[in-house]
Image: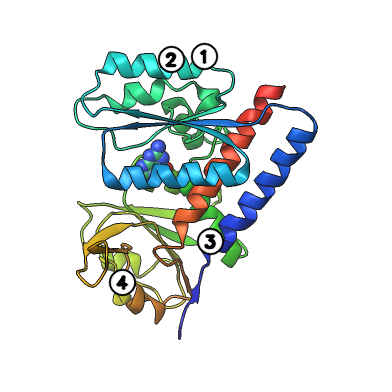
């Protein structure tokens, strides 16, 4: 059996085209152009590359974007001032602070400084609280988790009652994706670094979401035949045959998984592009709410 390869680029294009069409409509109605500010602290190459991709996507969608690049040794107070200015700026509808932050900065305080109505990443503690509560909805669905659910729904008619196993419990992916899967009425098991005998658990999963940041950790014999596998991992591994000296691999051993799963996302070209498309969508939603 060879799994269907879930095409994240094509899914992302559909989302981005829909956003672009709505922005063109806004322009004809003389409504404000949606604006996104990214805040990047430090010079981590992977974060720089993610932020560049977000700005490229904004440009293509017709979103005005502002890049705020700050030194790694910025004080908490100075960072708070930058965020407070962006919070007051009515041309900025969405604010994204790229994570992880350099050591010495308090992530929770920084995320709380982004006003809820501009929190297009959906990382504000109140937003996550709403995501976690039954009968409540978040203001913004965090982008990567939202992309994971979107891709799953393209290949599975219903998530209701499915056994979903999430590898990883990070604030950015593992925890919010688990909460979303629960909202979809899946039965969710979260595995993490202290989980014993992980492969026994993953082998029972109809849906396996890998977000652990360990290159190719999930082997073919960890996967239930016919499972849908969503690989959120983006890991750089040394490869001297490549001009840049590394290649990107996921958390799943892709070649092995292809023979067992019914559908799988590739890395790159799977979840990554959909994450960025969801950011464009959330920025548009923030601008639409600001019209009212
Ligand atoms: N770092 C890794 N993924 C993300 C993301 O989706 N948003 C932000 N702000 N930082 C990240």
- Observer-side mark, 4 or 2, equals 2
Determine contact: label 2, label 3, CB under 8 Å. no
Residue 84 badge: 2
Q: Secondary structure at mark 1?
A: helix
Where on the picture, by quarter, is residue 61? Answer: top right
Dot 1 or dot 3, earlier in sequence: 3
Determine contact: label 2, label 1, CB under 8 Å. yes
Task: Report which residue position mark 1 lands on.
Answer: 88
Where on the picture, by quarter, is residue 207? Answer: bottom left
Is 15 on the left-hand or right-hand side of 164? right
Residue 253 badge: 4
Query: Within 10 angstroms of label 3, few (less than 14), some, or many (20 or more) residues?
Result: some
Residue 209 badge: none
Is residue 175 at least partly visible in the picture?
no
Task: Report which residue position mark 3 lands on.
Answer: 9
- Observer-side mark, 4 or 1, equals 1
Rounded to the nearest angstrom, the CA distance separating label 4 from label 3 is: 20 Å
């Amino acid at each position: 059996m060879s799994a269907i390869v879930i095409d994240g680029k094509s899914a992302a294009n559909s989302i981005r085209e829909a956003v672009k069409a709505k922005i063109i409509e806004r322009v004809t109605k003389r409504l404000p152009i949606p604006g996104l500010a990214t805040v990047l602290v430090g010079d981590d190459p992977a974060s720089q590359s993610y932020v560049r991709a977000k700005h490229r996507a904004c440009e293509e969608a017709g979103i005005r974007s502002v890049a705020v690049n700050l030194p790694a040794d910025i004080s908490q107070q100075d960072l708070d001032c930058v965020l407070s200015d962006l919070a007051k700026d009515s041309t900025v509808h969405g604010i994204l602070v790229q994570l992880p932050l350099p050591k010495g900065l308090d992530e929770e305080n920084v995320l709380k400084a982004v006003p809820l109505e501009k929190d297009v990443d959906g990382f504000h503690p109140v937003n996550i609280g709403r995501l976690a509560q039954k009968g409540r909805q978040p203001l913004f669905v965090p982008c990567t988790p939202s992309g994971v659910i979107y891709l799953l729904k393209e290949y599975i008619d219903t998530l209701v009652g499915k056994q979903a196993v999430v590898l990883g419990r990070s604030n950015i992916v593992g925890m919010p994706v688990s909460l979303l899967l629960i909202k979809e009425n899946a039965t969710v098991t979260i595995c993490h670094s202290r989980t014993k005998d992980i492969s026994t658990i993953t082998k029972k999963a109809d849906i396996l979401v890998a977000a652990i940041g360990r290159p190719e950790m999930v082997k073919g014999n960890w996967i239930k035949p016919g499972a849908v596998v969503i690989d959120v991992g983006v890991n750089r591994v040394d490869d001297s045959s490549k001009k840049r000296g590394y290649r990107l691999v996921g958390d799943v051993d892709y070649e092995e998984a292809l023979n067992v799963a019914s559908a799988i996302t590739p890395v790159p070209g799977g979840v990554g592009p959909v994450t960025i498309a969801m950011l464009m969508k959330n920025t548009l939603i923030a601008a639409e709410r600001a019209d009212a």
